[in-house]
Image (cartoon, grey):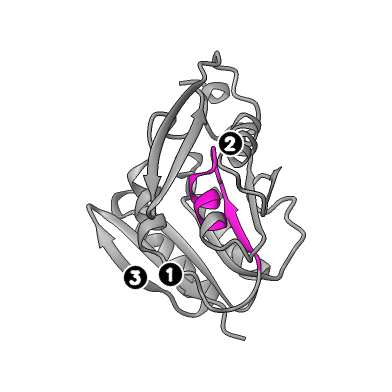
């Protein structure tokens, strides 16, 4: 597969094939519009669903950031379940971002802003209470570890980073990186080879 067809590219060149389907996440019903050239276009992938269903939003007051939001399942679920918080959703993929905006409107989610950013490249805020990511594994270890490392600088004190990643796709090295950056991390849950990992910014 050439990079232009890959979900981790700014403008996927693969021909569009828009589809729409319904699902339930964390007890909420969603209608998602998806397309070729975005991650897991046919269903919410197991890793994202695992994170959505199992993570705990910290009590620390503040906004939420979804890094690598795709067409929006994680960020939009968090926004609907935490309507008092502002949720920012970023992705490198412009097709995915357009879908996120469509899906926010179609599901009546108003407390989100969506914009293009390669990781944290264009994220200026550093006061997030929660950052979540199902990182783009196919983009390579450096990209994933850059997201983990840069998350620290964008969290407020006592803010938390939640990451879902498969053991065979780099969970052990991600844990090492988080321990290095945050001083600690916790494998909150494991399921079917996926690790749900949390790291808190202690200042």
- Label 3: how many Cα within 10 Å (few below 14, some 14–19, many 20+): some
State the separation of the CA atoms marked 1 and 2.
26 Å
Q: What numbered label is drawn on residue 99?
A: none
Relative placement, left or right, of 62 versus 167 is right
Q: Are circles 3 and 2 on residues that touch, CB within 8 Å?
A: no
| Label 3 SS | strand
Which sits earlier in the primary sequence, circle 3 or circle 2?
2
Residue on which the image places disc 3: 188
Left or right, 101 with respect to 1, comes to: right
Report the span colored magenta: 63-79
Question: Does the magenta-highlighted stretch encompass residue 185?
Answer: no
Q: CA distance from mark 3 to mark 1?
A: 10 Å
Labels 1 and 2: the sequence-earlier one: 1
Q: Is residue 64 magenta?
A: yes
Single out the mark in the foreground, 1 or 2: 2
Q: Is residue 90 left or right of residue 187?
A: right
Question: Please, which residue is most extreme toward the top here?
Answer: 15
Residue highlighted by disc 2? 106
Quadrant position of residue 55? bottom left
Where residue 142 appears, as percent x and y from the top left, is 53, 50
């Amino acid at each position: 597969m050439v990079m232009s067809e890959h979900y981790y590219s700014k403008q996927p060149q693969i021909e569009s094939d828009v589809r729409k389907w319904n699902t339930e996440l964390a007890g909420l019903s969603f209608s998602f519009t998806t397309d070729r050239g975005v991650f897991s276009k046919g269903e919410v992938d197991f890793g994202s669903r695992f994170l959505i269903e199992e993570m705990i939003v910290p009590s620390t007051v503040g906004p939420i950031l979804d890094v690598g939001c795709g067409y929006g399942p994680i960020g939009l679920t968090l926004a609907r379940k935490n309507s008092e918080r502002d949720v920012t959703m970023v992705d490198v993929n412009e097709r995915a971002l357009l879908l996120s905006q469509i899906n926010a409107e179609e599901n009546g989610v108003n407390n989100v802003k969506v914009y293009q950013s390669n990781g944290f490249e264009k994220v200026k805020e550093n006061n997030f209470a929660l950052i979540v990511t199902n990182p783009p594994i196919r983009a390579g270890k450096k990209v994933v570890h850059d997201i983990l490392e840069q998350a620290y600088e964008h969290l407020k004190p006592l803010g938390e980073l939640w990451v879902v990643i498969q053991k065979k796709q780099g969970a052990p090295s991600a844990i090492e990186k988080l321990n290095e950056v945050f001083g600690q991390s916790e494998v909150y849950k494991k399921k079917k080879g996926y690790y749900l990992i949390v790291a808190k910014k202690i200042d």
